[in-house]
């Protein structure tokens, strides 16, 4: 089982607006394996939430649109089930004359098996049974996705208040989730719901079963949401900033709970957060996003020990309360409708050279001696990567001086957010 | 920083009545702030930190009399502002300004920022429009914007820029005190650093006193000279920032510091996790308000507990005071704890836990070991659980109440100087002090 459970490949998610096309996610790759926690980290507007919502396509379409990209969900059971249900939309990579390929005028996209209507991709069969394959979530129709959403792939959102219906008891809402994906009768579903509530640490679960959401505190509500997400024994849990609305002491409780549940059930977790502290606490692998692109990804220890991309360094150095001097990155996120050429971070990067401003975002180079990949020209041929492996702050001061020096009293970067204004204001 | 005190708050209380019926009869009160004392000197930044609902924002609004405090004195340069009439209050407000959390909500979208920033000047009597514009332009430049921005509208600015404008508006009347309520929590980390260093610079330039309210200890550490930690309407510890971070004296401060996730995966799992939620401020716990969650809660004399187990037993006891335990949950979710010997098959074919099995299940639910190390304590606990599972909740509850009382719920600790040199409100320190004062007691 070396295949990742979820594999996002070259995903592009766009929103068509009056001001132009917003390229929220612009070609990213993310893999999540069973039993693994992958964190996507980035500032607001970096596209991390859109990525997570593209996986199960729960974003509004239109205006949302996924023109390019593939989201592979490799759960053999789901593949078998959907292959039975949608026989005409199965594509077998070993049968060259697979039904459907002939006579269509849409040419198969490069490297992508089948055409638009094939979403169940079979790669291997042993006898009659499918033994390897995946579901392409981008192509999958809504009635197929409905089985997967909440069933195989569950979501937890940031604000527990708005994820619960205030006019139904929490017990009823969990029973609904249980029965949606199983044939349990009312009595069995109730028992399962109480079991789940207890599992996520709600005291006196049976007694609280008939309580309404407003009778729970914020942390307890988030536990209820987690119980609902677990109702169908999902293979993947997508958690979008699940602790951001909570106090630190409660956040610590919820993070403990997620880790514990993952150990018990062996789920894959895709965790979206802006907080590097939380990342360090729970991640196995980290993906750092900036302006719709992946800047750097890697194993959590390697990434925190030796951040390869200048942006990752900057993010780590600007955390308040580390004791040292605070660094501000200066500048602001580039325009999402009309991104700059070259590396998206180049306009704010103190190391930027001419090559950084031309062409496309640099490819993901692997970092020597570490389980890490980075999109930065300094890791390519003819460059010395040690240049960018210095402190961000020091590099910033150096550039500031060569710029002819900025006035003291204001730190480099206070005359910042100019570019935001020029492209029409508030994000 | 000078020795002169600009602001002194003594015994500040703010209670909100809970009313019922058409006659608005008071049936209880939310003790949002329940007697806090602190002082701020010119040029100094005092931080107030705590979880949501601990009353930190209420401190801010009631000390500026945006809300009338229920009790207490607020001395501003020695004058008690709680006795001020309307005209005096207006004059006072020129000297103390406030910045709020959400920069978008704190501006009128129909007023240009020049009008917004200049409005306090108009209120305080500068009627010359051109002079107002001059002052505003100068200030916009000082906070890192450009003077040309004066005729722009709030929607044209990013969140960080709006917070700069908010700072300019607070500074426009030349105040001596700025109260900032979570000024950076709505901003991204990379912008936070900008605003915080701007605030530090401005404070040094104008020799301002600042009261900085935040739930984020990292931010507090960055800007504050001293920190007051609040829990349920009370200050539990007040100390110079670096000292507080390196050597916290109150168990709550330790827990709060311990639960910040550190951006270092090697420190993973070293956090202290507090059990439970913050209790309701309308009915705060007796004695030390933190004793219902405190990991270091003091065990009663005569019993030897492992601290962790004592905490669990306390959790059980607090739960039993609320009413009979929910045995259905124990039956559905903790039937494994009992072991096979205690599962019996009832007449209808369902398997049922016997009493011993239920007791084991309750222990598991509350994280209490199946046998406590202290035999006497084990005996008390076993008797209480036996009573509980045999439908005699009252006697089980009373037994626990009688035997397992903690000194923390009987005595409310006061803010007293600790051996570390600053004030904390915890009985553990009082005990320590007594031991030092009466060494020959044993």
Image: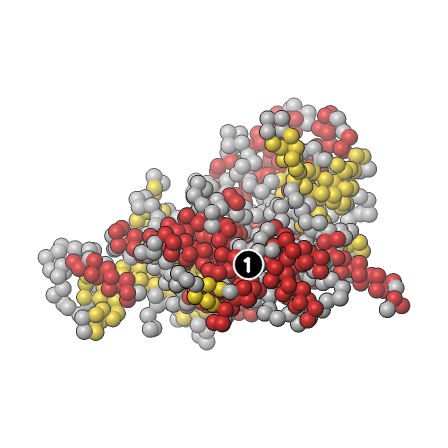
Residue located farthest toward the bottom when viewing the structure as drawn: A369
The residue shown at (57%, 59%) is: B390
Position of A397 relative to A389 (above/below): above
- The secondary element bearing badge 1 is classed as helix
Q: Which residue is mark 1?
A: A253
Residue located farthest toward the top when viewing the structure as drawn: B127
Residue B121 in percent (x, y) is at 65, 29
The residue shown at (39%, 51%) is: A175
The residue shown at (55%, 34%) is: B107
Assign the C terminus of chain A to one quadrant of the image. Answer: top left
Along the line of sight, the residue nearer the viewer: B217 or B403: B403
Task: Please give the chain letter of the residue carrying mark 1.
Answer: A
Along the line of sight, the residue nearer the viewer: B155 or A36: A36
Residue A375 placement, left or right of A255 = left
Q: Is residue B361 visible?
A: no
Residue A79 in percent (x, y) is at 26, 63
Pointer 1 local density, CA inside 10 Å: few below 14, some 14–19, many at least 20: many
Along the line of sight, the residue nearer the viewer: A196 or B382: B382
The residue shown at (54%, 64%) is: B355
Residue B71 placement, left or right of B341 = right
């Amino acid at each position: 089982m070396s295949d990742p459970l979820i594999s996002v490949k070259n995903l592009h998610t766009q929103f068509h607006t009056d001001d132009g096309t917003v390229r929220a996610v612009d070609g990213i790759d993310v893999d999540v394996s069973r039993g693994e926690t992958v964190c996507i980290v980035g500032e607001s507007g970096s596209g991390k939430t859109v990525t997570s919502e593209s996986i199960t396509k729960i974003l509004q379409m239109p205006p949302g649109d996924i023109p390019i990209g593939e989201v592979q969900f490799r759960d053999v059971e789901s593949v078998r089930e959907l292959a039975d249900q949608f026989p005409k939309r199965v594509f077998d990579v070993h049968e060259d004359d697979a039904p459907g390929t002939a006579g269509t005028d849409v040419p198969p996209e490069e490297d992508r098996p089948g055409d638009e209507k094939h979403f169940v991709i079979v790669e291997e069969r042993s006898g009659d049974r499918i033994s390897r394959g995946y579901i392409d979530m981008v192509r999958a129709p809504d009635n197929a996705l409905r089985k997967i959403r909440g069933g195989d792939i569950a979501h937890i959102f940031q604000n527990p208040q708005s994820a619960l219906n205030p006019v139904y008891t929490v017990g009823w809402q969990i029973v609904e989730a249980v029965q949606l994906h199983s044939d349990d009768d009312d009595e069995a579903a109730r028992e399962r719901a109480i079991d789940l509530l207890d599992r996520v640490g709600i005291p006196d679960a049976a007694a609280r079963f008939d309580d309404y959401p407003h009778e729970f505190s914020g942390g307890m509500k988030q536990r209820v949401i987690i119980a609902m997400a677990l109702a169908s024994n999902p293979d993947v849990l997508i958690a979008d900033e699940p602790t951001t609305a909570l106090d630190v002491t409660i956040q610590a409780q919820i993070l403990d709970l997620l880790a514990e549940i993952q150990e018990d059930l062996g789920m894959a977790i895709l965790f979206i957060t802006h907080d590097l502290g939380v990342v360090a606490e729970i991640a196995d692998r980290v993906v750092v996003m900036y302006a719709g692109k992946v800047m750097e990804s890697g194993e959590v220890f390697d990434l925190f020990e030796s951040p390869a991309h200048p942006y990752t360094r900057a993010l780590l150095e600007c955390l308040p309360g580390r004791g040292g001097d605070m660094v501000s990155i200066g500048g602001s996120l580039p325009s999402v409708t009309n991104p700059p050429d070259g590396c998206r971070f180049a306009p704010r990067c103190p190391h930027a050279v001419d090559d950084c401003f031309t062409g496309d975002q640099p490819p993901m180079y692997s970092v020597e001696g570490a389980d890490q990949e980075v999109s930065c020209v300094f890791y390519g041929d003819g460059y010395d990567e040690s240049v960018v492996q210095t402190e961000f702050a020091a590099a910033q001061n150096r550039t500031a001086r060569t710029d002819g020096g900025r006035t003291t009293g204001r730190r480099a970067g206070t005359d910042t957010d100019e570019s935001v204004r020029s492209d029409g204001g508030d994000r | 920083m000078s020795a002169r005190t600009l602001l002194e708050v003594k015994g500040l209380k703010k209670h909100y009545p809970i009313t019922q019926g058409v006659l608005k009869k008071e049936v209880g009160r939310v003790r949002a702030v329940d007697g806090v004392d602190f002082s701020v000197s010119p040029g100094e930044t005092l931080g107030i930190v705590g979880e949501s609902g601990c009353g930190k924002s209420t401190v801010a609004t009631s000390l500026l009399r945006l809300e009338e405090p229920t009790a207490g004195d607020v001395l501003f340069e020695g004058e008690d502002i709680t006795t001020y009439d309307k005209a005096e209050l207006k004059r006072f407000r020129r000297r103390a300004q406030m910045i709020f959390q959400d920069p978008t909500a704190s501006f009128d979208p129909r007023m240009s920022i020049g009008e917004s920033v200049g409005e306090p000047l108009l209120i305080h009597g500068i009627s010359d429009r051109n002079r107002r514009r001059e002052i505003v332009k100068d200030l916009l430049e000082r906070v890192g914007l450009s003077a040309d921005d004066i005729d722009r509208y709030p929607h044209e600015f990013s969140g960080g820029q709006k917070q700069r404008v908010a700072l300019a508006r607070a500074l426009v009347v030349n105040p001596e005190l700025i109260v900032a309520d979570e000024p950076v929590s709505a901003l991204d980390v990379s912008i936070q650093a900008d605003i915080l260093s701007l605030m530090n610079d401005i404070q040094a330039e104008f020799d301002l006193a600042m009261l900085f309210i935040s739930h984020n200890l990292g931010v507090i550490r960055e800007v504050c000279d001293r920190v007051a930690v609040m829990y349920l309407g009370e200050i539990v510890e007040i100390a110079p920032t670096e000292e507080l971070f390196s050597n916290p004296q109150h168990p709550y401060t330790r827990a709060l510091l311990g639960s910040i996730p550190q951006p270092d995966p090697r420190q993973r799992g070293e956090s202290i996790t507090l059990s439970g939620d913050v209790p309701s401020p309308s009915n705060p716990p007796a004695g030390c308000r933190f004793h219902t969650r405190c990991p270091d809660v003091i065990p009663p004399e005569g019993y030897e507990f492992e601290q962790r187990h004592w905490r669990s037993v306390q959790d059980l006891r607090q739960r039993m005071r609320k009413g009979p335990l929910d045995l259905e949950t124990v039956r559905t979710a903790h039937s494994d704890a009992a072991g096979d010997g205690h599962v019996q098959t009832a007449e209808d074919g369902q398997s049922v836990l016997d009493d011993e099995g239920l007791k084991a299940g309750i222990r598991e639910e509350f994280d209490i070991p199946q046998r406590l190390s202290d035999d006497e304590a084990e005996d008390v606990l076993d008797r209480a659980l036996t009573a509980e599972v045999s439908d005699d909740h009252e006697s089980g509850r009373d037994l626990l109440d009688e035997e397992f009382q903690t000194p923390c719920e009987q005595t409310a600790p006061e803010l007293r100087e600790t051996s570390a040199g600053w004030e904390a409100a915890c009985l553990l320190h009082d005990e320590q002090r007594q031991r030092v004062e009466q060494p020959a007691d044993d």
